[in-house]
Amino acid sequence: MKQLTYRQMGLSDEEFQQVETILGREPNYLETGMFAVMWSEHCGYKNSRPLLKMFPTEGSQVIQGPGENAGVVNIGDGQALVFKIESHNHPCAIEPYQGAATGVGGIVRDIFTMGARPIALLNSLRFGDLEDARVRQLFRGVVAGIAGYGNCLGIPTVGGEVYFHPSYQDNPLVNAMCVGLVDQDEIALAVANEVGSLLMLVGAKTGRDGIHGATFASEELSESSAERRPAVQVGDPFMEKLLIEACLELIKEDLVAGMQDLGAAGLTSSIAETASKKGLGVMVDVLKVPRREEGMTPYEIMLSESQERMLIVPRPGKEARIAEVFDKWGLDAVVIGKVTADGMFKIYEGEILAGEVPVEALTDGCPVYVRQGEEPPHYKEAQAYDIDSLPRYDLQEALLKLLASPNITSKKWVYRQYDYQVMTNTTVIPGHGDAAVLRIKNTLKGVAFTTDCSSRMVYLDPYRGGMLAVCEAARNLACCGARPLALTNCLNFGNPEKPYIYWQMQNAIQGMADAARALNTPVVSGNVSLYNESRSAQVFPTPVVGMVGVLDDVSKRCEMSFQNEGDIIVLLGRVRTELGGSEYLAVCHQIEAGEVPQPDLHEEVQIIEMLLELCARGLIKSAHDISEGGLAVTLAESAIQGGLGFETDLPAAADQASQILFSEAPSRAVVSLAPENLDAVKEMASRYQLPWTVLGKVGGRRLVISEGNHELIDLDLEQAGHTWGEALACIMK
Amino acid sequence: MKFGIVVFPGSNCDADCYHVMKHVAHQNVEYIWHKQDDIKDFDALILPGGFSYGDYLRTGAIASFSPIMPAVIDFARRGGPIIGICNGFQILLEAGLLPGAMLRNRSLTFICDTVNLRVNRTDTMFTNQYVQDQVLQVPIAHGEGNYYCDNETLKRLQDKQQILFTYCDADGRETAEVNPNGSVSNIAGIINERGNVMGMMPHPERCSEPILGSNDGLDIFLSIIEWRQGVGMR
């Protein structure tokens, strides 16, 4: 085997030697390719596995933690949510539409593979500076790709987040999350099969697309990455829709022993995982695989990442009925192999044995690297930044600038392209609440979903930033009245072989783990995307949190918009002044530094519990958490979405108005309530040991913020609404 | 009353329509798989939204050649009520049951939003529960909802009062600014001359329960039930 070949496939010299030791001989081309994809970071988690062990994964609400296609949590009434988030970053950098579309397709397959009906899609997107035409093209393409695929499937895209920062210029992040609903007695766990079981392949024909996609995802982007376009797959949402309906029908009729979607590393990965769970072997004949093109080699067939394919292990004797169901949906299912007892993965091309490797060597045999992290020099420098040295900035101008900042402005230009209402469950639609809320038909319940990560905070302080991401997600759910249950995450980082990057990973993961433990939101699934680098930069460390929650009574849900003139506006939580890492510093002062606000996990638990009680008892009309842009932006958004102004008075604090208005410190929310409920709310706050401040009243057509007799901000509601509502659409015109 | 919901491969609003008919309007309702060719015992048909056959070639084009379609056309000839919603409307156009065609939205993007619709006639089997010129809030979700027809067809639609729903502002005015997709004359929904086949781009099944923000759409379905109980299809 030529050094050049296995290196191109992504194996190191040491790893290749390891393969030789396992096999007791030199692997052939096919075998080398199989090891290369299975041992890639994308499939094998070889750099991240030791770090992932830090996450809490258990809790009474958890039905299935990490290790399956997706995590599962109990939502009562014998029902469960199945959910996971996954990246498709590298394909989107090269071919945004198809990259994003197939990212959606992949995560949806993970969900229905578990027997769940997909009920919602979310996403988390990061792009470079929108001033750059190429970035706008990537952004436009990714949004269109998500829309094109998700809309066709009839799964509503109900929430998400979009951020812009130059560190993502050439390496956008595209993370897609899917949530499914399942009756607990119909959860299908991957493949418990017996010797002699057949392997059926169904769905699209296998082509040459996406070969070595998993490997491609596990290296840095470079000038030559565009040549990797064949490594990007092409999606067919119509085929996926048929697969969803057919596969869910199979599970309803209890016809399958196991089901596995074909994702990264295609047949190689899905077959290996099928067998490895029980220490079994497997044989497959590549000539049985329906192919799109003539002359495909066993290597190409085994590594193809053609989309919309599923591997089915039928219950014995049910093969004919399965074929009938697929026929109804116009799908071809073919038997391509069977489960054996010898622990070997044997690939035949007709009669000829094209390769054989021990199944376990591909999966559990993947090498694991514990690396040494090193604190980057920018960390201490950024921490030491002296906020007091800031020049003055007009507060009203600052607020307008923030409302127009792409990171804060309304994302309507994006979500208007997504069908967020299909399935008729969406009760809090995008832009109206801190999370999406869906009802569950035939119950009183609701479920809520959100994705969050303030990556600038993670960059400045990975440990605190990781905590903040988890806290914000949980607070967003609580603002809608939903109890946070569990989370999934997508860990987007640079090259882990670089000590600074590894240090970021270690600390961010530790921070997320500590917060998840404190908030009782265990990690039940996730995905790691490393090597997010290009010639221009490493991306900001971006560990995205996707969280789900439940409302016992969906009629108690809460939105962010002010509802009635004369309602009292209350800040729950402390008046805080830390500006480190804020959007205000970045937008108004071009500074990305400062000490990241310290999260207090006890306080976070208290405010979440209090928000839940406020919603459940119907004491508040609106709730909106304080995050990007701080208190001022939170107030403005509640006003704009409610079509009502406000008059507020800041607590006197000598010369600290800009800090109070724009600090993004956590564990705080702005609520509005009828005057007669104020006493009850104050009483509750003291019970939860939470500070509160009456800020003022809802009403009028102006956004007024004063400090004593001194007016700091006085903005026309229409003007603020126009600035916030149209900025993104204007840029994208 | 027995409603049939025609399911094509790629339909994705079929379950939403089923839910409204069964659990909100409390009617008898069944799915009709597109490979069936007999629909004798149904009183009304719904062609739901979605992406039939992936909308490859042209929206609704392949579905209009589906095995079920001759029976649907026959049902229409016999005077049976048929509603086509979104992709269902596109299929009715392709099948020639309604005049005109769909172009891509003027913005060239998919649009999901809630719009105002004006009810232009209340003497039909689909609108008898509304008042004349009532303004409804109804969601839209489509990439190709830009209704087009030639001037002659438009004049005929106007003369015969076949333009049932138009995009309007909150006060019922049909302005260019509130036309979401570029449709000719702000057309959102039309009816055939005989008055038993109706197609509309907006989704009434998405606004048939208060929990979804509006139940303005429910009266379309209730109108059919009312009509059936009154004059009836004998």
Image (tube, rainbow, N blue to C red):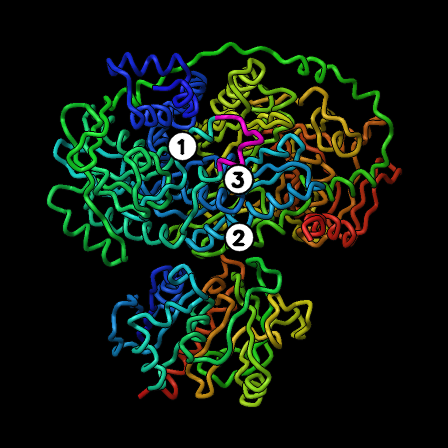
Residue B23: % across, % down? 36, 63
| Label whose residue precedes the other's in the sequence (1 or 2) | 1
Above or below, A353 relative to A443 = above
**Residue assigned mark 2:** A418
Residues shaded magenta: A219-228
Tell me: residue A455, above or below residue A715: above
Name the amino acid type tagged 1: His
Name the N-terminal-most of marks 2 and 3: 3
Residue A685: image location, x then y, percent? 61, 32
Q: Label 1 belongs to which residue?
A: A212
Q: Residues within 10 Å of mark 1 (few under 14, many from 20)?
A: many
Q: Circle 1 sits in a helix, a strand or a loop, which is it?
A: loop
Q: Chain of mark 3?
A: A
CA neighbours of label 3 inside 10 A, class few (<14), some (14 to 19), many (20+): many
Which residue corresponds to mark 3? A92
How many residues crowd around disc 2 within 10 Å: few (fewer than 14), some, or many (20 or more)?
many
Q: Position of residue A512 (x, y in %)?
A: 52, 23
Which residue does the image show at 35% across and 26% down from the upper left? A38
- How far, Cα to Cα, is label 1 from label 2? 30 Å
